[in-house]
Amino acid sequence: MLLGRLKGVHDLAPLILRLVLGLIFIVHGYHKFFGEMERFIGTVTGRLGMPLFMAYVAAFSEFGGGILLVLGLFTRWAALFISGVMVVAITKIHWHQGLVKGYEFPLSLLAGAVTLMILGGGWLSVDKLTKKEW
């Protein structure tokens, strides 16, 4: 009975996913930009051996992408960049720790981001208001 009633609100799923993922990435991106950017740069350039600009791309993808997800603006593009960050996080940082207490959280975030790439922002999004499903 209850599950049958949920069919009528299935259009809220992208909104809920956008808000939750957006908040998580805003917090994580903010922390990188305004908290521990030097440490994050050290991890990206030292431990991961990636160029400096990638630290800024990752931090901006998280912080800016999170804001875009909350707004439902350029949802698919924001989700694409966030997915890229999560793939790198899983393969370069968390993989060796295994699934449990390792890459399970970034994998969940990746699944949510890929879902938003497929679904778009949903009907309660700036994308929908502008009639552009980026």
Image (spheres, rainbow, N blue to C red):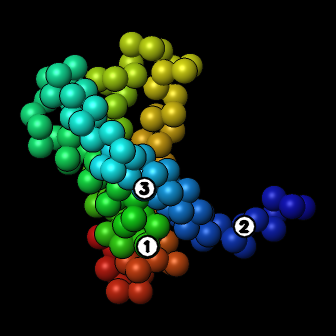
Q: Measure the alpha-carbon separation of dots 2 and 3.
A: 30 Å
Observer-nearest residue: 42 or 99?
A: 42
What amino acid does circle 3 point to? Ile
Q: Secondary structure at mark 2?
A: helix
Where is residue 110 drawn, in percent x and y? Answer: 42, 42
CB atoms at circles 3 and 1 under 8 Å apart?
Answer: no
Q: Which residue is mark 2?
A: 7
Q: Earlier in the sequence, mark 1 or mark 2?
A: 2
Q: Secondary structure at mark 3?
A: helix
- In the rendered image, which quarter contains the C terminus? bottom left
Q: Earlier in the sequence, mark 2 or mark 3?
A: 2
Is 28 situated left or right of 85 in this image?
right
Outermost residue to the right: 1
Q: Which residue is mark 1?
A: 71
Where is residue 48 drawn, in percent x and y? Answer: 20, 23
Is 57 situated left or right of 107 in this image?
left
Q: Measure the alpha-carbon separation of dots 3 and 1.
A: 12 Å
Is 47 situated left or right of 36 in this image?
left
Q: Measure the alpha-carbon separation of dots 1 and 2.
A: 24 Å
Q: Earlier in the sequence, mark 3 or mark 1?
A: 3
Label 1: how many residues lie within 10 Å, few (<14), some (14-19) or many (20+)? some
Residue at position x 37%, y 28% from top?
90
Is residue 111 something that shows in the picture?
no
What amino acid does circle 1 point to? Leu
- Circle on res. 26: 3
